[in-house]
Image: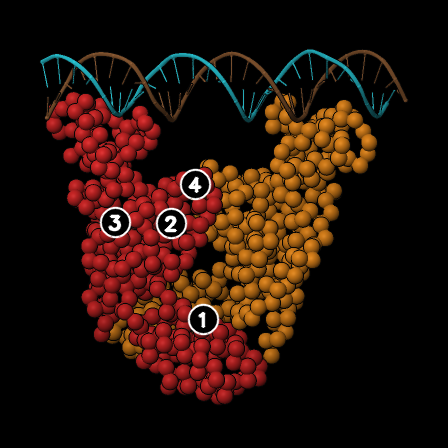
Chain colours: A red, B orange, C brown, D cyan
Amino acid sequence: MILKAIVRDYTSSGVPVGSKALATQLPLHVSSATVRNEMAALEELGLITKTHSSSGRIPSVKGYRYYVDHLVQPDPIKANDIDLIKSSLDGQFVKIDEIIETSAKILSNLTSYTAFTLKPELKESRLSGFRLVPLGKRQVMAVLVTDNGDVESQTFNIAPNISGDQLEAVVRLINDQLVGQPLNSVLQALQTEIPLQVGQYLQRPDGFLKIFGDVLTKAAQERFYVGGRLNLLNFSDSSDVDELKSLYTLMDRTDDMASVLGQPSDHIQVKIGSEITNDILKDYSLITATYEVGDHGKGVIALLGPTRMPYSRMIGLVGAFRQELAQRLIDYYRYFDQ
Amino acid sequence: MILKAIVRDYTSSGVPVGSKALATQLPLHVSSATVRNEMAALEELGLITKTHSSSGRIPSVKGYRYYVDHLVQPDPIKANDIDLIKSSLDGQFVKIDEIIETSAKILSNLTSYTAFTLKPELKESRLSGFRLVPLGKRQVMAVLVTDNGDVESQTFNIAPNISGDQLEAVVRLINDQLVGQPLNSVLQALQTEIPLQVGQYLQRPDGFLKIFGDVLTKAAQERFYVGGRLNLLNFSDSSDVDELKSLYTLMDRTDDMASVLGQPSDHIQVKIGSEITNDILKDYSLITATYEVGDHGKGVIALLGPTRMPYSRMIGLVGAFRQELAQRLIDYYRYFDQ
DNA sequence: TTTAGCACTCATAGTATCCAAGTGCTAAGA
DNA sequence: TCTTAGCACTTGGATACTATGAGTGCTAAA
């Protein structure tokens, strides 16, 4: 009960909490001295610490962990918030990506923290088609489609001496040999056999290979969105410029962030401070949740905030949001899947 | 001479400069008392100020202005720097936009400030084609091309009850009526007659109209790139979080930034502190330069830094960079234009 | 087991003091 | 008339000292 009160107090006020204040708040009627004894015990257990020898107590990482694992109960979500979520997700979206991207924004607005969303994805998507669409005299658009429904495109200029036939031959080559293969394999093939084969049709295959590689890697990458980047300035130290920089740099690296978010799991996960695998985030906490979209795979939403975040509220919010988002996406697919 | 020395000193050290230090630095042999008398005169003229009543002097906005207008001579660019520029611009680019984007990065790296680049653009580009490329069962990609060579695309899903014929009819409609018109007019038509006409072919035209509007506005927007966003943290106060936030928000608004950069002009422009039209930037300085790419229009590069930036070096750099970039782009067009 | 009492600790804010860097002004010198 | 030495004065910043108050640990009594 005391640990719970300390966490609650500290996360809402940000000030180390002392025995006297605590005694008056507790549902039991006990004196501050009693509280002090109990606090000494909690400190012994490593659940709370002091900032200096005569200060009030703050929860340690271990303390937060115990609180999150055993004591916290998610706040019921406010009617206001649920309305906001519903109405924000209710827009006229024409692409899944838009929904996912907006989700990150909503979640960050709701919490004043920074939010991440990962698009739901089948384990391994396969190449389902590649085309070159001629646009102007020299302009061509390369379009790559996966069996997942993801589309990547890029325009480029071709050298004047390349004929339409040559391009068609290359497209046919790619489609014949690679459609149906997982993107990873295609990427690998790009390093090995493809250049040789393409070389039969094009004099200087470099340009084409670069384009193809670009759209391919874009398609193979996880779709990762960040909302409320700037909120980081609120809750981070923000005096240490270098730290801020590495944080922002980290957030732009899709791969690193994907590994930080970790494996999908069914329940809401909370990683606190040093529990996060990446050192740059050791002073923050991360709440992640997986959302399932029927047979369209799983996605992840996550929330990054200070270690001293009001976990009960945030866990409640993330939980509610994941449900709303999943529902919204299921509806989306139901409408468009034949 | 004294003003020049003060600006030079202060921009390189960041510390208000006093009469004694100044006396030893000046090419003339004069005592500090003489310098003090001159400084009093300069202060009278409003060219320099004190931070407090017994501090050294710093240049005022008016002082910087005078310096930039009459005293500064651009530093000759270092061999190192020119090599870096050349080699960075030398990559295998397949799109103009890539070159422009990289330019912002190079310039920001070179200066440790924040750089902006605006793609060269003809006065008003016109719609030269619109298509819908079917990708899968329900997926369609909308592609819009301008006579400028700009391409915008977006994928979306169509409702199951729409036939290929309907889409073709819509595409034909758009192309027949609107090709050759300036994008602005097309945007306007989108508000007025187009919805009615499209309504004849589609039951629920909203989705299509949104897509068309989206790609259209994207194409009509100026192409604007920012490099070294994070450098802002170095040279801005960075303790005032709200200020930082509005600064970053500003940088994401293409329109506002375009108006901040101002009208293209032939020579390098320097705007100092409160001279910048936007209040958010009142403690910064902005160096802008226009680069011309033959008959492919004009673009802009710009550099944002603290008011106390070493103008001579920066003006030199921006000048050299603009030349290199223009040359690079001219080469690019020469290679691909027929 | 709980509690009152008390000595002790430490961060924070406020105050005084010193120092260095710089200024303005005056009066003498070139 | 311009330059310069000299000097009193101003100011921010560093350093030291001193309350003050919130909080602790421990002891002894209830």
Name the residue located 28 percent from the left edge and 39 percent from the top edge.
A60
* Discs 1/3, front: 3
Q: Earlier in the sequence, mark 2 or mark 3?
A: 3
**What amino acid does circle 2 point to?**
Asp
Count of labels shown?
Answer: 4
Which residue matches tag 3? Answer: A270
Q: Is residue A338 above or below residue A301?
A: below
Residue A279 numbered mark, or none: 2
Asked if labels 1 and 2 share a chain, the reply is yes
Q: CA distance from mark 1 to mark 3?
A: 35 Å
x and y, in percent, of residue B313 in the image? 67, 48
Quarter of the C terminus of chain A within the rendering: bottom left
Q: CA distance from mark 2 to mark 4?
A: 17 Å
Q: Earlier in the sequence, mark 1 or mark 2?
A: 1
Q: Earlier in the sequence, mark 4 or mark 3?
A: 4
Quarter of the N terminus of chain A within the rendering: top left
Q: CA distance from mark 4 to mark 3?
A: 24 Å
Name the residue located 22 percent from the left edge and 52 percent from the top edge.
A268
Closest to the observer: A235 or B67? A235
Q: Earlier in the sequence, mark 1 or mark 3?
A: 1
Asked if labels 2 and 3 share a chain, the reply is yes
Which residue matches tag 4? Answer: A238
Name the residue located 66 percent from the left edge and 34 percent from the top edge.
B59
Q: CA distance from mark 2 to mark 3?
A: 16 Å
Q: CA distance from mark 1 to mark 4?
A: 36 Å
* Discs 2/3, front: 2
- Element carrying mark 1: helix
Closest to the observer: A48 or A320? A48
Residue A214 numbered mark, or none: 1
**What amino acid does circle 4 point to?**
Ser
Q: Is residue B219 above or below residue B335?
A: above
